[in-house]
C-alpha cells in the first residue's frame, strides 16, 4: 500500500515551489558559463594573448569538462547523492572561476609574463573550473528524472531551469554593462580589473541562488525503483544499443554547439564586424536572454508529449537558420537591425534548449539508475565538439 502511494506521488505534477527551487540550482554554473563563452576569448586577446593561445585555453577547459562529465556521471549512477556532487562542484566553481578572469597568478609569482606561462596558467585554472562545473551540471540535470515520472513536470523543470539560465545571463550582462561603463579600460591592469569585478559579482549572485536550491530541494532517489525496489546500475551498453540514444545525442550536441559558438563570437561580431559601441557587447546578448526568458516561462504552461517536443524543436531550428542568414547578410550601415535579429535568436534558443533537454528525459524514461550517465555522455559530446569548433575558428580568427 505504501509503495502504491509513493508511486502515485512520484507521478503527480511537481509543485511550483519545488520547481522554482530546482530551477535556481544551476544559477552559479549558468552565470559563470555565460561569462566564459561570452568574454573569455575577448578577455584573453585584449590582454595580449594570440588568438591561437586563447583558443588553447578554451579547448583545455572544454576537454576537462567533457571528460569530467563522463566521470561524474558514472560516480553519481554508482553512489547517488546528487546534492553532495552538486555542492562539491559549486565550491570548486566559486573558488576557481575568479582565477580564470582574475589575472595570471603564476605569472606574478614567477615574475614572468611570457606567452607560454600565461597560456599554461590560464589553461590550468580553466580546466579546474570546468571540472567543478561538470560535477554541478551532471548532478543537477540528471536529478530531473529522479524527481518525477510525470512527463509534463519534467519539461516544466527543464523549462524553469532554462528560464533561470536566462536570468543568470541577464544578470551577467547587467553586471558587465555597469562595469564597462564605470571602469574604463586604458591599460592591461584596467582590463583585468574590469573582468575581475565581473567574476566576483557573478560568483556572489550565483552562490545566493544555489543556497535557495539546497534549502528547498530534497535529495531525490536514484537507487530505489518507482515501486520501492532496489535496482542495480544500468550498464553503458544498454544505452549504446538504443537508436533513440544516438538521435537524442545528435540533437543535444548540435543545439549546444549552435548556442555556445554563437555566444562566444557575439561580442566579436558586434564590436569588430558591425563596429558598434562597447556597450552593445552587453546589450545585444541581454536582448537575446530577455526573449529566451519570456519564452521559457510560457513553455511551462503547455502540456507536453513527444510529438510536441519535436514540433517545437523543429520550429526553433528553422527560426535559427533564418537568423543566421540575416546575420551573415547584415551590412555594417544597418547594424542597428542586429537588435531585431536578437529577439528572434532568443526565441529560437529557448525553443531548442528546453525541448532538447526534455528529450533526454524521454530517453531516460523510468531507467533512473542510468540517468547520470546519459546526461554525462551527452554533455561530453557537447563539450568536446564545442571546444574543437571554437579552437578551429579561433585559430583562424584575426583579432582587430
Image (tube, grey):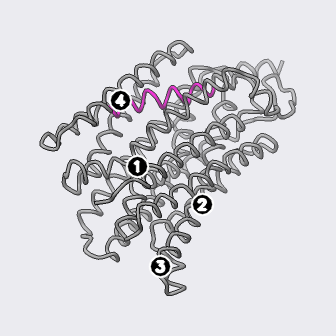
Which residue does the image show at 63% across and 33% down from the upper left?
A: 144
Disc number for residue 36: none
Q: Are marks 4 and 3 in contact (CB under 8 Å)?
A: no
Q: Position of residue 346 (x, y in %)?
A: 35, 34
**Nearest the camera: 263 or 54?**
54
Characterize the local packing of mark 1: few (<14), some (14-19) or many (20 or more) Cα atoms within 10 angstroms.
many
Q: Position of residue 152 (x, y in %)?
A: 56, 20
**Nearest the camera: 397 or 247?**
397
Compared across the picture, whether 184 is left or right of 320 comes to left
Q: Which comes sooner in the sequence, label 1 or label 2?
A: 2
Q: Which comes sooner in the sequence, label 2 or label 3?
A: 3
Q: Which comes sooner in the sequence, label 4 or label 1?
A: 1
Q: Are marks 2 and 3 in contact (CB under 8 Å)?
A: no
Magenta highlight: main SS: helix
**Nearest the camera: 6 or 47?**
47
Compared across the picture, whether 297 is left or right of 62 comes to left
Badge 2 element? helix
Q: CA distance from mark 4 to mark 3?
A: 43 Å
Badge 4 element? helix
Compared across the picture, whether 179 is left or right of 380 comes to left
Part of the protein shown in magenta: 345-361
Q: Position of residue 67 (x, y in %)?
A: 67, 50
Q: Which residue corresponds to mark 3?
A: 114
Q: Which residue corresponds to mark 2?
A: 127
- Is 5 magenta? The answer is no
Badge 3 element? loop
Q: Which residue corresponds to mark 1?
A: 264
The correct choice, above or below, for 100 with respect to 359 in the image is: below
Mark in front: 4 vs 1: 1
Disc number for residue 347: 4
Amino acid at each position: 500500500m505504501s509503495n502504491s502511494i509513493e508511486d502515485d506521488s512520484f507521478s503527480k505534477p511537481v509543485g511550483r515551489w519545488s520547481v522554482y527551487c530546482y530551477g535556481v540550482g544551476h544559477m552559479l554554473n549558468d552565470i559563470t558559463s555565460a561569462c566564459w563563452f561570452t568574454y573569455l576569448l575577448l578577455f584573453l586577446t585584449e590582454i595580449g594573448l594570440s588568438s591561437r593561445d586563447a583558443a588553447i585555453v578554451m579547448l583545455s577547459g572544454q576537454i576537462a569538462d567533457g571528460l569530467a562529465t563522463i566521470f561524474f556521471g558514472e560516480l553519481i549512477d554508482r553512489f547517488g547523492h546528487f546534492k553532495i556532487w552538486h555542492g562539491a562542484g559549486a565550491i570548486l566553481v566559486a573558488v576557481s572561476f575568479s582565477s580564470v578572469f582574475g589575472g595570471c597568478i603564476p605569472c606574478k609569482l614567477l615574475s614572468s609574463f611570457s606567452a607560454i606561462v600565461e597560456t599554461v596558467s590560464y589553461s590550468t585554472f580553466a580546466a579546474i573550473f570546468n571540472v567543478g562545473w561538470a560535477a554541478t551540471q551532471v548532478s543537477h540535470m540528471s536529478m530531473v528524472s529522479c524527481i518525477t515520472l510525470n512527463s509534463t513536470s519534467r519539461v516544466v523543470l527543464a523549462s524553469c531551469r532554462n528560464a533561470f539560465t536566462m536570468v543568470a545571463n541577464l544578470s551577467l550582462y547587467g553586471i558587465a554593462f555597469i562595469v564597462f561603463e564605470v571602469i574604463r579600460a586604458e591599460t592591461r591592469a584596467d582590463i583585468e580589473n574590469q573582468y575581475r569585478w565581473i567574476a566576483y559579482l557573478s560568483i556572489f549572485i550565483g552562490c545566493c541562488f544555489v543556497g535557495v536550491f539546497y534549502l528547498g530541494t530534497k535529495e531525490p532517489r536514484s537507487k530505489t525503483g518507482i515501486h520501492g525496489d532496489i535496482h542495480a546500475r544500468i550498464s553503458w551498453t544498454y544505452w549504446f544499443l538504443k537508436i533513440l540514444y544516438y538521435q537524442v545525442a545528435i540533437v543535444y550536441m548540435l543545439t549546444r554547439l549552435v548556442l555556445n559558438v554563437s555566444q562566444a563570437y557575439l561580442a566579436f561580431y558586434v564590436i569588430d564586424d558591425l563596429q558598434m559601441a562597447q556597450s552593445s557587447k552587453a546589450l545585444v546578448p541581454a536582448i537575446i536572454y530577455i526573449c529566451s526568458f519570456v519564452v521559457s516561462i510560457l513553455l511551462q504552461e503547455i502540456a507536453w508529449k513527444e510529438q510536441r517536443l519535436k514540433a517545437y524543436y523543429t520550429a526553433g531550428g528553422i527560426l535559427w537558420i533564418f537568423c543566421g542568414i540575416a546575420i551573415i547578410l547584415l551590412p555594417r550601415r544597418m547594424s542597428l537591425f542586429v537588435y531585431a535579429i536578437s529577439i528572434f535568436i532568443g526565441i529560437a534558443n529557448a525553443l531548442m534548449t528546453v525541448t532538447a533537454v526534455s528529450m533526454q528525459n524521454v530517453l531516460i524514461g523510468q531507467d533512473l539508475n542510468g540517468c547520470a550517465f546519459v546526461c554525462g555522455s551527452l554533455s561530453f559530446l557537447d563539450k568536446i565538439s564545442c571546444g574543437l569548433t571554437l579552437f578551429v575558428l579561433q585559430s583562424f580568427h584575426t583579432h582587430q
